[in-house]
Image (spheres, helix red, strand yellow):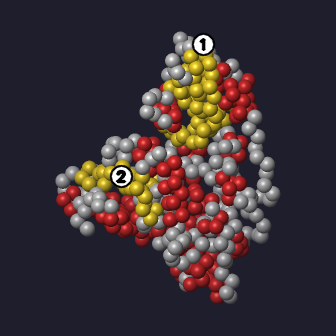
Amino acid sequence: MGTVPICAGVILRSGMVLLCRRAPGRTRAGLWEFPGGRVEEGETPAEALRRELREELGIEAVIGAQAGRVRHLYDDGEIELIALLVTAFTGELTLKDHDQARWVESRRLLEFDLAPADVPIAKALASHRRRGRYAGTHPRRFGEKYKEHAADPEAVAKAKSRGSTPAGTHLPVMLAETLAALSPLAGADVLDCTLGWGGHAAEIARLGGRVVGLDRDAEELARAVKRLAEAGLVVTARHFDYADALAAAAGLGLRGFDALLADLGVSSMQLDRPERGMSFKNDGPLDMRMDRSRGKTAADWLACATQPRIAEALRDYGDEPDAEKIAAALAGLARQGRVPRTTFELVAAVGSAKGLGPGPFRKKDAFAAHPAARVFQALRIAVNSELDSLKALLAGLPALMRPRGRVALITFHSGEERLVKDALDAQAAAGVWAAPPGPPARPAPEEVRENPRARSARLWSAVRAFYRGARDSFAA
Ligand SMILES: C[S@@+](CC[C@H](N)C(=O)[O-])C[C@H]1O[C@@H](n2cnc3c(N)ncnc32)[C@H](O)[C@@H]1O
């Protein structure tokens, strides 16, 4: 008999790792291990692990990088253990093949009576030392920051305890709920209007969906295409604003979709790249455009906008309570030719308009928002005309969806919520949707703990009616 491939999940939560004890009656009963199981013929280790964790522990796992690979010769044959990081999961842990589970600090893993094949993996995790600190408060190079991605449980746990999403982390929001809303996916033509990192699209493709992915950000789109291809996943990617989704579909010769996803707003990668100028956390040029090949940067937008227009944007797109004061300050700076040109200049201008002293802002508690957070959100929405694109997408939904087609829309703030709710309600009244869409779903507390950026996500779903209004599918 040859070497048997076995997958194992190094499941991370708040800097701890999950160990499970093999139940009585199994080989190596009583020993602790990273849960997993056999990789079946035709499965990749990641696919096998996802299946095993679903069957064994009742969870939907997001699989990350490889944590280690070892061969071990047991009395009953040789195995190759392929350990993969599990960076997030949804669902309640339930034990089937194990009688105990424990969350363990990585440095204490070796204190457990481990199955011999799991020992080298545990050793590597236990001896993992945080990389040396970069000078100053922020890494200088973006690459340094991205090293934190799932590689350093300690750094990840620390960021989460501050109520932040660790730098470089990309976790698809409300993944399990979104997949459920869009199912069945096998053989379905699926439009992912916001491909982003490709997190949702990858899972949809793995479940057999034929994905067309759009993104207006050509730079991130190219990275997503590369990443998906490296994972062996087929996704047809196009550089498009989703406002033009019908044109994108027509260009591909497609007449409607069985499922459509729009995960609105900005991605973690865009926020974390200082040169995009989208985050108050990183100093960079005040750009904020998702599509850097066109349109005004945020600095230019501020230089041209009137004070009432700035105030309106801050109020409507950011629910900013100090909209008038901040607009007055920003318009004043523009008149003096001193419009903020960098993200930190904008942070300073907002701080001074709010009467906060100079120097770094200290949060009152882990979940307190940064005083410039609403201003950054509002400006980004204005610069990218995000709500106009959303309106156009919503208006196109009846024509984009085939009869019984499933729609999942993930919103992140009240402006998006209002537009989505009003459009879906009006279309339901006109017979477009099989049933009136209910209130949106919220992320589970478990997900918010793992990925604080998910906290304001709301998932809206609807199913296209079969007869009424379905006649005009693709009328455009
Ligand atoms: C929240 S991210 C999507 C993340 C993705 N679901 C994943 O799991 O990786 C949103 C993405 O939508 C893109 N986007 C935002 N507005 C868009 C628009 N009007 N048209 C096309 N793409 C847009 C952004 O550039 C960003 O990459």
- Mark nearer the N terminus (1 vs 2): 1
Q: Residue furthest front?
A: 2
Q: Which residue is mark 1?
A: 75
Report if the beta carbon of the residue with label 2 is closer than 8 angstroms to ligand 1: no
Q: Is residue 107 among the parts visible in the rendering?
A: yes
Q: Is residue 315 among the parts visible in the rendering?
A: no
Q: Give coordinates of residue 175: x percent, y percent.
A: 47, 46
Is 356 drawn above or below residue 131 in the view shown? below
- The quadrant holding residue 270 is bottom right
- The quadrant holding residue 332 is bottom right
Q: Residue at x 21, y 51 (%)?
A: 466
Q: Residue at x 46, y 53 (%)?
A: 458
Q: Residue at x 31, y 54 (%)?
A: 257
Camera-nearest residue between 189 and 417 = 189
Q: Residues within 10 Å of mark 1 (few under 14, many from 20)?
A: few
Report if the beta carbon of the residue with label 1 is closer than 8 angstroms to ligand 1: no
Camera-nearest residue between 72 and 297 = 72
Is 201 drawn above or below residue 19 in the view shown? below
Residue type marked 2: Val
Q: Quadrant of the C terminus?
A: bottom left
Q: Give the secondary structure at mark 2.
A: strand
Q: Residues within 10 Å of mark 2 (few under 14, many from 20)?
A: many
Q: Residue at x 45, y 58 (%)?
A: 194
Q: Give coordinates of residue 268: x percent, y percent.
A: 58, 56
Q: Residue furthest right?
A: 135
Q: Give the secondary structure at mark 1.
A: loop
Badge number at residue 190: 2
- Are circles 1 and 2 on residues that touch, CB within 8 Å? no
Q: Give coordinates of residue 442: x percent, y percent.
A: 47, 48
**Relative to residue 424, is residue 34 drawn left or right?**
right
